[in-house]
Amino acid sequence: MFKKILIANRGEIACRVIKTARKMGIGTVAIYSDADRHALHVEMADEAVHIGPPPANQSYIVIDKVMAAIRETGAEAVHPGYGFLSENPKFADALEQAGVAFIGPPKGAIEAMGDKITSKKIAQEAGVSTVPGYMGLIEDADEAVKISNQIGYPVMIKASAGGGGKGMRIAWSDEEVREGFQSSKNEAASSFGDDRIFIEKFVTQPRHIEIQVLADQHGNAVYLHERECSIQRRNQKVVEEAPSPFLDEDTRRAMGEQAVALAKAVGYTSAGTVEFIVDGEKNFYFLEMNTRLQVEHPVTELITGVDLVEQMIRVANGEPLAFTQADLKINGWAIENRLYAEDPYRNFLPSIGRLTRYRPPAEVAEASHAVRNDTGVYEGGEISMYYDPMIAKLCTWAPTRAQAIEEMRTALDSFEVEGIGHNLPFLAAVMDHPRFVSGAITTAFIAEEYPEGFHGVTLDGAVLRRVAACAAAMHRVAEIRRARISGRMDNHERVVGTEWVVSLQGESFPVSIAADREGATVRFEDGDSHRVAGPWTPGDSLARFTVDGVPMVLKVDKITSGFRLRFRGADLKVAVRTPRQAELAALMPEKLPPDTSKMLLCPMPGVIVKMNVAVGDEVQDGQALCTIEAMKMENILRAERKGVVSKINAGPGDSLAVDEVIMEFE
């Protein structure tokens, strides 16, 4: 077995590989850029080598620099993680020439399957059903428009060397093809150093289901069942689960056998993923093969008990697989939520800054349930603008899908992240969405269910009352604490009132509280009552209650006259007042937000790549105004209404902060 491996990656996947290597008794080497000098993967590794400036194309994807780190440390093997150099045949070749083992597939398999154009041709030749499309190289936007018309709209514009949603656009018209073609080329060039583009038919109402395969160097290959990855936003997976709630056993077997046959056809070894589009009739079409470990591999590990990173290392060491297809059963259900540094209230635009609070739920591995959190960050660390905005991958496992969802709800409610925008509220909303709960999902789920973006969660009446009851019980505890500190309590005599008005989400509930040593009974005006129990202390950021015997976890912040409470994706300002205070508060005027309707504000920290208009131009609703690049993605900002540009405050190359004014209108 290898004595030392280098991880040619960063963030959570580097930390993930280090954990398995440590378990196997293998030494580890991390590489890091200037931006990652204090990163978690650097702290976890046995050794660390600096490889350059923050941009990936000056550090993590510079093959010569990685090879120099290998020589310096004497690493015998390299695990590439995903992204960066993981599917780069030149890197695999450089390792081979240096006599260093690549913990991944052979160079030929990477070339054949890692390139989406070539892989589709091979799949077609092997008799695999593929999505209609144009596999040749496309020279310019005019040719892209011509091809798109031949295929028929909508079409998918994709980077040949792409992955992770980078360099990918859906186009519904000639104009969108022209815009998307250039943006895809730009993103592909900056992310992968390869700007080749191809176009295929975009299948409407599809499900994205992928098969995990694993093959050794002795001709053995198996599939570790499927993952459902249909909850996507901007072609980036957000929620994954294993198995799929849609497949039956016959379809699962057919997809798995086809995936294994394709892997064998290209001499594949190591872990890989064959992705399919599956329609409503369970017809499946080969989409692509990812010749690397997938981001969502933990859900497969949770339902099979197989450590995929360990198997990759063993295969690279020449060992045969220690199990057969018959050994790989599906045990229970697993769900993964990707926690991103993206602001859901700003159309999920990237957010950067310091994690002033990062407290994930405790990891658990028991027979009844499991919680797993793969991360590469820590409290006090920085989320950089240079890399993917992922903070963590939160996974839960339970014997059934319904139980796994409930475990995820509690885990999300318990996950504390402060200092940056993040998508925790949105993930919580998805877990409660009836369509997700039923399993009736497609890749269009987010676009269809949140067509105007995500604007928070409105709790239904029954849930709102339970939150109100918790707020009243918490307020009583806080009032008792204040009374004791101020000296208003003598000999434990109760001087805190029992009548309160709880106001939240536009409603007010007069309540009375009867407390005892075990908890408090909160009674509403109409006679409805709730029993609240739990050891919350003022200052605690999490309140773990049971309400009528049902567990509830609330995130708590103290604000004037009450609390800011977050629960199941809802972010609530809760006021708890005496009846007289509530009466007076109702007379107070509401403060209105400032008018920014005649300004284009920068929605995220980023760099202006292109300015499409000039002072004096008349713009139309939906017209492109400028393009901003942040976290390797290009974002086109468009006019919300007709107007005339009166002032432009920034230009190409300028770095802007959130809400900085880009331009103004008459």
Image: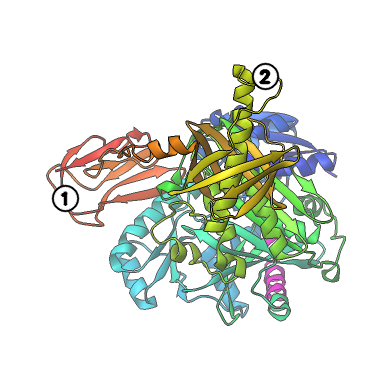
Residue lying furthest right in this view? Answer: 322
Residue 73 x %, y % = 73, 31
Kind of element beneath mark 1: strand
**Image quadrant of residue 297?**
bottom right
The quadrant in which the N terminus is found is top right
Residue 641 x %, y % = 22, 54
Q: Is residue 102 above or below residue 134?
A: above
- Amino acid found under the numbered disc labelled 2: Asp
- Amino acid found under the numbered disc labelled 1: Gly
Kind of element beneath mark 2: loop
Residue 490: mark in rendering:
2
Cα–Cα span, label 1 and label 2: 67 Å
Residue 194 x %, y % = 47, 52
Q: Is residue 8 above or below residue 221?
A: above
Query: Which of pointers 1 and 2 lies earlier in the amino acid sequence?
Result: 2
**Is the magenta region chiefly helix, strand or loop?**
helix
**Residue toward you, 625 or 58:** 625
Residue 129 is covered by the magenta coloring: no
Left or right, 403 with reference to 342: right
**Residue toward you, 436 or 502:** 502
Find disc 1 in the rendering and name its residue.
643
**Image quadrant of residue 477?**
top right
Residue 570 x %, y % = 52, 49
Q: Residue at x 39, y 37 (%)?
A: 585
Left or right, 153 with reference to 599: right
> What are the residue bounds of the magenta stretch?
255-272
**Residue toward you, 593 or 83:** 593
Q: Is residue 608 above or below residue 120?
A: above
In front: mark 1 or mark 2?
A: 2
